Image (spheres, rainbow, N blue to C red):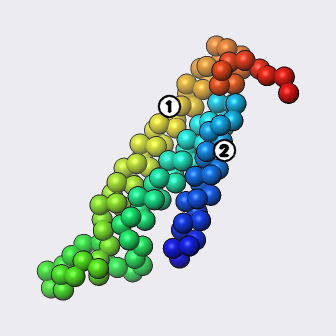
C-alpha cells in the first residue's frame, strides 16, 4: 500500500512539474493543480495510512495513539481541496480574460515557431 501511495505522489509530482514547464497557460494551470494534489496526498499520508481505524479517541478504550488515525491531516487536506478548486476556477477565468485580450494562450504572450 505504501509503495502504491508513494508512486502515486511521484507520478503526480513529475506530471505536474512537466506541465508547469509547458508554454501554454492551460497546461501551466493543470500542472499547478497536479502539484497541489500531490502535496495534498503527501500531507494526508503524514497522518499514517490506517484502514478501518476510528479518527477520534474514545473514553472507553485504550489511549494508545497507534490505534487511531490522525484527524488533523485529514482536515487540512479537505480544506486545501476546497481552496484548490476555488483557485483553479480563478486561474481559468484569468486565462480566458488573458486569451481574449492578447489573442494567444502562451505564457509569455507570443507564439513561437517550432
Please tell me which of labels 1 and 2 falls first in the chain.
2
In this view, the residue farthest toward the top is 101
- The quadrant in which the C terminus is found is top right
Query: Which percent across, then down, holds residue 99?
Result: 66, 20
Residue pictured at 62% horizontal, 39% vertical: 20
The picture quadrant where one finds residue 77 is: bottom left
Considering only vertical position in the picture, is 66 above or below 48? below
Residue 56 percent location from the top left of the image: 24, 72
Residue 38: horizontal and vertical position, in percent?
A: 52, 54
Q: Circle 1 sits in a helix, a strand or a loop, which is it?
A: helix
Q: Can residue 99 be spotted in the picture? A: no
x and y percent of residue 93 in the render?
55, 27
Q: CA distance from mark 1 to mark 2?
A: 22 Å
Work out whether 18 lies above or below 42.
Answer: above
Residue 18 shows which numbered tag?
2
Residue 92 visible in the current orientation: yes
Q: Which residue is mark 1?
A: 90
Residue at the image point whose x is 62% and y is 52% from the top = 14
Residue beneath the point at 50% across and 31% down? 90
Residue 49 shown left or right of residue 38 in the figure: left
- Under tag 2, what secondary structure? helix
Q: Are marks 1 and 2 in contact (CB under 8 Å)?
A: no
Amino acid at each position: 500500500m505504501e509503495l502504491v501511495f508513494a508512486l502515486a505522489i511521484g507520478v503526480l509530482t513529475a506530471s505536474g512539474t512537466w506541465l508547469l514547464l509547458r508554454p501554454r497557460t492551460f497546461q501551466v494551470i493543470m500542472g499547478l493543480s497536479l502539484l497541489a494534489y500531490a502535496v495534498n496526498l503527501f500531507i494526508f499520508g503524514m497522518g499514517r495510512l490506517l484502514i478501518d481505524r476510528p479518527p477520534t479517541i474514545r473514553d472507553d478504550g485504550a489511549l494508545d495513539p497507534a490505534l487511531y488515525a490522525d484527524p488533523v491531516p485529514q482536515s487540512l487536506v479537505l480544506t486545501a481541496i476546497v481552496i484548490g478548486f476555488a483557485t483553479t476556477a480563478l486561474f481559468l477565468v484569468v486565462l480566458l480574460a488573458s486569451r481574449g485580450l492578447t489573442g494567444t494562450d502562451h505564457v509569455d504572450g507570443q507564439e513561437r515557431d517550432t
